[in-house]
Image (cartoon, rainbow, N blue to C red):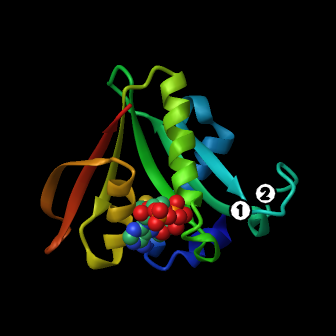
């Protein structure tokens, strides 16, 4: 997972550290933290054989949103550049949505940045029927808005 996150050039070091903390919590204390992960195994790798980054095509971390009845947050989704454009991200989101539905979740929220480097990411969510629910202008830094998207399940 460390190598995968290092390959995502749009992530800052601070974002990588936070992303790894969520992965650690999902592995070591999922009940207390509320964080969970879905991992896409690279084609050709034997499922469950190892946590070796060679076998990880992408992952998604999510959790039930505290103080809501049944909303979920999609915290991070990342696909190794070598596996982009092959439907891995779409499958990870579909797996999340199915998991939420089974837990009687009614909504998934995701936040992203308005900066140009994230234009593809924003389009990725819009193409999967996420709806822009609002923006906080200059939230990350001047000119870089927080974009809040949601999908009703
Ligand atoms: C965003 C990301 C997860 C997409 O993963 P992916 O596996 O390449 O996406 P998919 O192949 O499943 O694409 C699904 C659809 O999203 C859209 N899409 C994906 N990437 C896109 C891009 N860069 N530009 C425009 N549309 C895009 C397309 O409509 C695509 O459908 P298509 O295959 O029919 O064309 C991946 O690019 C990534 O890891 N980005 C860096 C990390 C990041 O920004 N994460 C989100 C913030 S935490």
Q: Is mark 1 within 8 Å of ligand 1?
A: no
* Residue appearing at x 57%, y 50% in the figure: 91
Query: Is residue 139 rendered to the left or right of residue 38?
Result: left
As helix, strand or loop, the secondary structure at mark 2 comes to loop
Q: Are marks 2 and 1 in contact (CB under 8 Å)?
A: yes
Q: Earlier in the sequence, mark 2 or mark 1?
A: 2
From the top left corner, tell me how far across and down residue 26 is, in percent: 61, 42
- Nearest the viewer among 117 and 90 is 90
Residue count near mark 2 (Cα–Cα under 10 Å), binned few <14, some 14–19, many ≥20: few
Q: Which residue is mark 2?
A: 51
Residue count near mark 1 (Cα–Cα under 10 Å), binned few <14, some 14–19, many ≥20: many
Q: Which residue is mark 1?
A: 56
Residue 124 visible in the shown view: yes
- Which quadrant, please, contains the C terminus? top left
As helix, strand or loop, the secondary structure at mark 1 comes to strand
- Nearest the viewer among 88 and 75 is 88
Q: Nearer the viewer, mark 2 or mark 1?
A: 1
Query: Is residue 113 rendered to the left or right of residue 45?
Result: left
Compared with 65, 69 (above or below) is above
- Nearest the viewer among 41 and 136 is 41
Compared with 96, 112 (above or below) is below
Asked where in the image residue 11 lies, by quadrant, the reply is bottom left
* Residue appearing at x 34%, y 78% in the figure: 117
Residue 22 visible in the shown view: no
- Which quadrant, please, contains the N terminus? bottom right
């Amino acid at each position: 997972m460390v190598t995968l996150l290092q390959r995502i050039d749009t992530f800052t070091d601070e974002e990588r550290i936070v992303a790894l903390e969520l992965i650690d919590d999902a592995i070591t204390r999922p009940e207390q933290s509320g964080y969970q992960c879905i991992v896409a195994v690279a084609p050709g790798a034997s499922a469950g054989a190892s946590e070796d980054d060679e076998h990880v095509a992408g992952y998604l971390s999510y959790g039930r949103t505290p103080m809501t009845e049944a909303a979920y947050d999609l915290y991070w989704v990342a696909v190794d550049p070598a596996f982009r454009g092959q439907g891995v991200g779409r499958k990870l989101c579909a797996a999340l949505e199915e998991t939420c539905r089974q837990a009687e979740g009614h909504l998934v929220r995701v936040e992203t940045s308005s900066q140009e480097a994230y234009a593809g990411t924003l389009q990725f969510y819009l193409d999967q029927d996420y709806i822009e629910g609002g923006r906080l202008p200059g939230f990350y830094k001047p000119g870089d808005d927080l974009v809040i998207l949601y999908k009703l399940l």
